[in-house]
């Protein structure tokens, strides 16, 4: 396994095979989508962890400038990243943020950014329980 690939903290077989509807990360569905290739799943989760800080920074910069088009783009990027790893709650939050920005209906940008940051931290913690995240 090269440096970019993560090591498993626990085997997937040891995890609950059903995800709760409000779970942070649906690892079972993610594994299934990746043909049960645990190395690929680890790689995808590792890439997510490495890329999300930049996406959140883009969201913060757009929020600071109150640029709805940039907010929409940043939320869209986060939505896609969350969809890729089957983080449905966060994907829905990002979708709502994206749609509000598109329609110029964001009421409290700092609060929505804080909510998105909290959701990303929740995902990071869930991933850390699943794989050993390599340091940068």
Image (cartoon, rainbow, N blue to C red):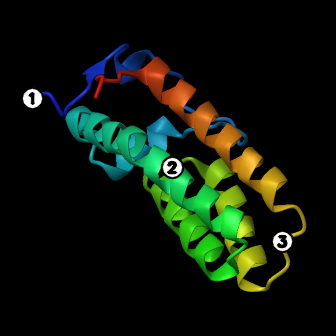
- Helix, strand or loop at label 3? It is loop
Is 117 placed above or below 122 here?
below
Q: CA distance from mark 1 to mark 2?
A: 24 Å
Image spot of residue 21 (x, y percent): 71, 42
Crowding at label 2, few (<14), some or many (≥20) Cα neighbours within 10 Å?
A: many
46 sits left or right of 72 in the view? left
The residue tagged 1 is: 2
Q: CA distance from mark 3 to mark 2?
A: 25 Å
Please report the residue visible at 20 percent of the width from the left and 31 percent of the height from the top.
5
**Does label 3 or label 2 sit earlier along the sequence?**
2
The residue tagged 3 is: 106
Residue at the far left in the pictured view: 2
- Helix, strand or loop at label 1? It is loop
**Does label 1 or label 2 sit earlier along the sequence?**
1
The residue tagged 2 is: 86
Image spot of residue 136 (x, y percent): 28, 29
Residue situated in front as seen by the camera: 91 or 18: 91
**Does label 1 or label 3 sit earlier along the sequence?**
1
| Disc 3 versus disc 2: nearer the observer | 3
């Amino acid at each position: 396994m090269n440096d970019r690939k993560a090591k498993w903290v626990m085997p997937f077989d040891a995890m609950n095979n059903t995800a709760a509807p409000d779970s942070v990360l649906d690892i079972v569905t993610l594994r299934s989508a990746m043909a049960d290739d645990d190395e690929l799943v680890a790689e995808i989760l590792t890439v997510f962890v490495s890329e999300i800080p930049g996406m959140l920074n883009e969201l913060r910069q757009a929020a600071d400038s109150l640029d709805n088009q940039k907010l929409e783009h940043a939320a869209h990027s986060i939505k896609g990243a969350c969809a890729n790893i089957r983080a449905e709650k966060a994907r829905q939050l990002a979708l709502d943020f994206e749609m509000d920005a598109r329609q110029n209906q964001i009421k409290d940008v700092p609060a929505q950014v804080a909510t998105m940051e909290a959701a990303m931290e929740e995902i990071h913690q869930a991933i850390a329980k699943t794989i050993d995240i390599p340091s940068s």
